Amino acid sequence: MRDTIKWVANRMPKSDDRQLSIMSLGNVAKARFFHSSFPQYSITPLARLDGMAKYLGLGGLFVKDESFRFGLNAFKVLGGSFAMARYIAKEMGRDVSEMTYDYLTSEAFRQEFGQATFFTATDGNHGRGVAWAAHKLGQKAVVHMPKGSSQARYENIAKEGAQVTIEDVNYDDCVRMAAAEAAETKHGVVVQDTAWEGYEEIPAWIMQGYGTMANEAAEQLRQVGVNRPTHVFVQAGVGSLAGAVIGYFTNLFPNDPPTFVVMEARAADCLYQGALAGDGEPRIVEGDLKTIMAGLACGEPNILSWDILRNHVAAFVSCPDWVSARGMRMLGVPVKGDPTVISGESGAVGMGLIAALMETDEYQDLRQAIGLDRFSQVLLFSTEGNTDPMKFRKVLWDGEYPTV
């Protein structure tokens, strides 16, 4: 018998919402300007799944396909690179708008700033993004990965010239390790998208970097005549991506925001647990956090994001691994006429969830609670491609994690 999807409506008390300003339209515009200065920059596709929308009984279904991002197969580089630029700008007493790719790769910059060492913990995509950006900008990177990390993801990080290890501890312990090493290193700095007391500035900058993706998606929707999505489904590990996307769209449509749904892996559903407790305080999930959704295997919430989520999310959903596997198969073998989206385990959970909600009445209570129907215009984010190719084949070719 398969595990069922669990969900909870958000009934938490509201806070003063002061973290929402992190994702102001001005901050996101600065991030987009920075990213667009890279010669590798291009806007990633927004896949329009008209056939799937019709099959599921929706007005429209759109999937932002981040497998094309900077040739790195995942969105994460947006956050790490922008945080580096803002850190360097602050150290130099300059504005981030001056930190273009051309300047950061110039001899003049090398003479003025020299080199910093950027430390991070990752299950793959974030570390690869930090390593890539450090390599491109002539900086150093040290990356720690939790136990069980994929060899393919390890090799992709090592290829970028970073010092990388797989440790015998979970993700949250790797974060602590990176922070301790950075504190002992001259010009050492932690670039992590999880915030804790006293470490809030860099995670806020990373969230702003993720805003580029949301900003592109909003623009692309307008180009096809969808002024505002009615529903935005976004997955969460520590919650930084979710907070960034939800914060941006809330600021973009302050008077009529979309309905927001946050999805997590069952093994690491710290945000769901917080919503379930209902008092507004974050909760921590401990243990090995074993899930195919490696990018979401984080048990400690980003406190900045948590504040945005508790104020603006309609429902928090805890998804077993089969939900993601089903999403991978549906995106990879689309309805005739729809584009194919190659989506990895952490990227496809939204597709799997939306299908579960629309195909049967098993989850009609959640479908009705969030008002999904034939008029809904739904936006999903496929945050990674097949970053672990062997795992991808096992799911798509061999039917690993079956739905029944």
Image (tube, rainbow, N blue to C red):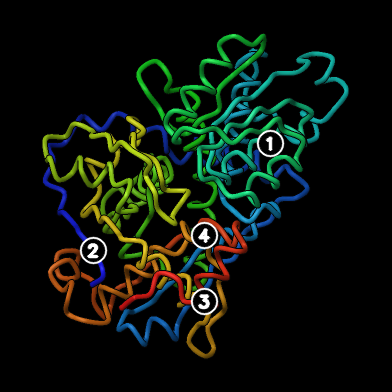
Q: Nearer the viewer, residue 31 or 287?
A: 287
In this view, 374 is above or below 88? below
Q: Residue at x 41, y 40 (%)?
A: 240
Numbered label attached to residue 131: 1
Nearer to us: label 2 or label 4:
2
Residue 237 position, x and y percent, is 39, 44
What residue sits right under mark 4 in the picture? 219
Q: Which residue bears the numbered disc 2? A: 5
Task: Measure how far apart labels 2 and 4 are at the Cα level.
Answer: 32 Å
- Position of 403 relative to 214 (above/below): below
Q: Residues within 10 Å of mark 4 (few under 14, many from 20)?
A: few
Mark 1 vs mark 2, CA separation in Å? 36 Å
Check disc 2 and report its element: helix, strand or loop.
Answer: loop
Q: Which residue position is annotated with label 3?
A: 398
Of mark 1 and mark 2, the one earlier in the sequence is: 2
Mark 4: secondary structure: helix
